[in-house]
Amino acid sequence: MNIILLGPPGAGKGTQAERLVAGRGMVQLSTGDMLRAARKADTPLGHQVAAVMDSGALVSDEIVSALIDDKLSTMTADQGAIFDGYPRTAAQAESLDAILSRHDRKLDRVIELDVDEDALVERIVGRYSCAKCGTNYHDTFHRPKVDGVCDVCGSTEFKRRPDDNEETVRTRMAEYRAKTAPVIPIYEARGILVRIDGMGDIDHVSAAIADILDGK
């Protein structure tokens, strides 16, 4: 199956995509990751991407579409694709249809992880990790057993991402809503958009996605 995962930053798209890759052999097509990889590649398209990114300009739809086209050409017919960060406009949605058609594929489902904004802000702003081993913690939901001491390695040093603050998180959510607003009606009209509760336990979200993909 070929799906789009939608959801604001912190909704858990990355975690769910990783599980689909591991459990179903699907391939995650993240535009951000593909652009970074292309920039490092010694190919004509890679040089083009590097030039655009170095100039500070936005990478065109044509370049992003070419990256997706290239990636799909390396996948086997039985590998499903997970589109992450694309499409974000009506024009990109149209381009994706054309690209999939060239590879004898179609878009099966668009899954949106529906979240409560205030709760998501709390989830993101409260998270931190051990500076030594990377174990994740949270101010409210998952504190170390001994305050200030990592459960796994015993380190007393912790770190937070500098952009995990309320103002930045709410700005990212507003950007997400603005960018996804144009494509949601397109997929609603086709009857392939499904919303699930993204605030639940990770395993419950995974089970809900599995039910969708298995047609339950």
Image (cartoon, grey):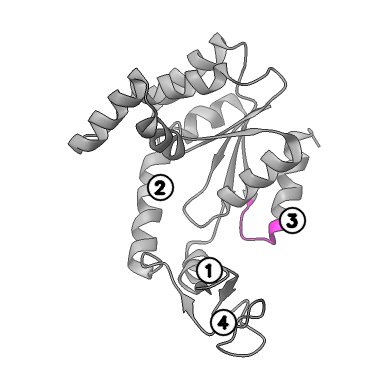
Q: In the displayed image of the protein, which residue is found farthest to the front?
A: 42
How far apart marks 3 and 2 lie (CA) works out to: 24 Å
Instruction: Look at the image and tell me whether residue 181 can be seen.
Output: no
As helix, strand or loop, the secondary structure at mark 4 comes to loop
How far apart marks 1 and 4 lie (CA) works out to: 23 Å
Q: Earlier in the sequence, mark 1 or mark 4?
A: 1
Q: Are marks 2 and 4 in contact (CB under 8 Å)?
A: no
Q: Earlier in the sequence, mark 3 or mark 1?
A: 1
Image mark for residue 176: 2
Instruction: Look at the image and tell me whether residue 84 can be seen.
Output: yes
**Badge 4 is on which residue?**
155
Mark 2 neighbour class, 10 Å CA radius: few under 14, some 14 to 19, many 20 or more: some
As helix, strand or loop, the secondary structure at mark 2 comes to helix
How far apart marks 2 and 4 lie (CA) works out to: 36 Å
Q: Earlier in the sequence, mark 2 or mark 4?
A: 4
Q: Which residues are magenta?
A: 197-204
Amino acid tagged 3: His
List x then y, in percent, for residue 103.
Answer: 58, 12
Image mark for residue 123: 1
